[in-house]
Amino acid sequence: MTTEQLMIDTALASWRQAVAQVSETFNSLTDEQFQREVAPGKNRILYLLGHLTAVNDAMLIILGLGDRLHPELDALFVKNPDKVSKELPTAANLKKYWAEVNQNVLHKMEALSPREWLQRHTAMTDEDLTKNPTRNRLNILLSRARHVSYHLGQVVLARN
């Protein structure tokens, strides 16, 4: 195994771990717990599940790996704050979407070579990458893993 492949495998292992921890946490919650706010007047846990699902699904586009499974979630969980929409998918449906999205994203990410990970993502130009080569696909993976972990912390605090 090359050093480059080992570094990519390490980053993917971090992604898998973050997603697995969130999945385990979401799967342990009751319907009542999904309605809890992470802080008074803030997002509910249900909203965070939808938000994380939508953001992870959008990784397919930004990484240039294909079409999203659930673009309809953006209006509910990315473009608007919690409680704007009166009707959200159930926790059971969102957990199903979460599992589908993350399985799909991981499968497609695992197919990228180390060289492909260092290429630009779709939210930037070749010129942008030349100016700052660290703004690449791998950077997206690492930032999204941090994003998942950040919201996991909120969920863990709110569920108690």
Image (cartoon, helix red, strand yellow):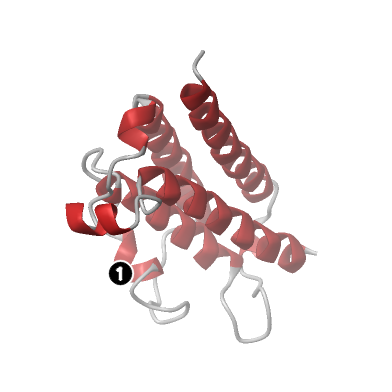
Per the image, label 1 sits on a secondary structure element best described as: helix
Read off the residue under disc 1: 75
Camera-nearest residue between 118 and 101: 118
Measured as percent of width and height from the top left, residue 60 is found at 30, 44
Above or below, comparing residue 13 to residue 53 in the picture? above
Q: State the image coordinates of residue 155 (x, y, percent, origin top left).
A: 67, 62
Residue lying farthest to the bottom in this orientation:
41
Numbered label tally:
1
Quarter the C terminus occupies:
bottom right
Establish if 11 lies above or below 32: above
- In percent of width and height, residue 69 lies at 28, 44
Relative to 117, is 6 on the left or the right? right
Give the crowd class for mark 1: few <14, some 14-19, many >=20 residues within 10 Å.
few
Q: Nearer the viewer, residue 12 or 127?
A: 127
Using the rendered image of the protein, determine whether residue 33 is visible from the camera's viewpoint.
yes
Residue placed farthest to the top in the image? 1
Position of 148 with respect to 61 (left or right) is right
The quarter of the picture where residue 76 lies is: bottom left
The answer to whether residue 44 is left or right of residue 160 is left
Any part of residue 125 in sight:
no
The residue depicted at 52 percent of the width and 58 percent of the height is: 49
Q: In this view, does 22 lie to the left or right of 124?
A: right
Disc 1 residue type (three-letter) = Ala
**Farthest-out residue, front:** 131
Is 57 located above or below residue 32 in the figure? above
- Position of residue 12 measured from the top left corner of the image (x, y, whole percent): 52, 33
Which residue is located at x 23 percent, y 43 percent? 64
> Residue at left 72%, top 68%?
158
